[in-house]
Amino acid sequence: MTNEQEQKSILVLGGTGKTGRRIVERLRGRGVAVRVGSRSAAQPFDWTDRTTWAAVLQDVGAVYVSFYPDLAVPGAPESVGAFADLAVASGVTRLVLLSGRGEEEAQAAEKLIQSAEVDWTILRSSWFSQNFSEDYLRDPVLSGEVVLPVGTVPEPFVDADDIADVAVAALTEDGHAGQLYELTGPRLLTFADAVGEIARATGRRIDFVPVSVEEYTKALDAEGVPGEVVELLTYLFTTVLDGRNARLADGVQRALGRPPRDFADYAKATAATGTWGRE
């Protein structure tokens, strides 16, 4: 980074989320000035309230852009594009976008970032391993039964720690501008395979139960899950998991010079923390 960039803060949007908090921890560990972008921050940031954007961009040189809840939701690309324009106007010179593989809306957002007059890096990521331990799949794992509307299509689960390492490199080092990194793990697993890895790591019986989309959405409705969340999950479990992402990519290797973390290693390390119950 240039001296001018080093004197400015790095803004991490979604700084309390799965990838964001890991990025914040790594940057602070390097002594980098970091600003957390979230609704709960001292200087709040809210994607749905554009009046909160300008203040968090003051004296910022680089931004990690993570859209909440997902780039697949209607209007997401337009919001990302408007934010990028404001960021450039505010003096930001580097944008790193967390994107999703196989999502048309996410790729629309990518194009808007790429067209901005700024150094950009795209992190096009597959399904996070941590969805099983830090998100809505943790409770089913704890219950011993993971019920999902997915079949035997494999997914190259990627570790959030790998995403964070690539993001930090792109935010702080030269050589990543203009790069689109497709981030995956080192092998393909079905959701049943992934649950099996967790069961072995914990020493517990955890069943994987495939169901129809109709059965799944009916169960979510019965639990009172908001309609927009049901719609998003249905999209992710059906459209995005139709086989379009059933291939590996070399983004982690290209960005970091090392192989990505395997799901089995994630499962063993996470089981050791006790988040899924006893080993």
Image: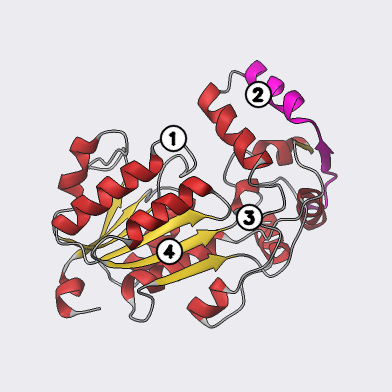
Marks 4/3: CA–CA distance = 20 Å
Q: Secondary structure at mark 4?
A: strand
171 in relation to 86, above or below: below
Marks 1/4: CA–CA distance = 20 Å
Marks 2/4: CA–CA distance = 33 Å
Amino acid type of the residue tagged 1 in the rendering: Pro
Q: Quadrant of residue 207?
A: top right
- Location of mark 1 (residue): 74
Q: Earlier in the sequence, mark 3 or mark 2?
A: 3
The residue sitting at 34% across, 54% down in the picture is: 112
Q: Position of residue 47 (x, y in %)?
A: 32, 39
Q: Are marks 1 and 3 in contact (CB under 8 Å)?
A: no
Q: Is residue 210 magenta?
A: yes
Q: How crowded is the residue under tag 4: few (<14 C-alpha within 10 Å), some, or many (20+)?
A: many
- Location of mark 3 (residue): 129
- Location of mark 2 (residue): 220
Q: Quadrant of residue 25?
A: bottom left
Q: Earlier in the sequence, mark 1 or mark 2?
A: 1
- Location of mark 4 (residue): 122
Q: Is residue 4 left or right of residue 259?
A: left
Which stretch appears magenta?
202-223
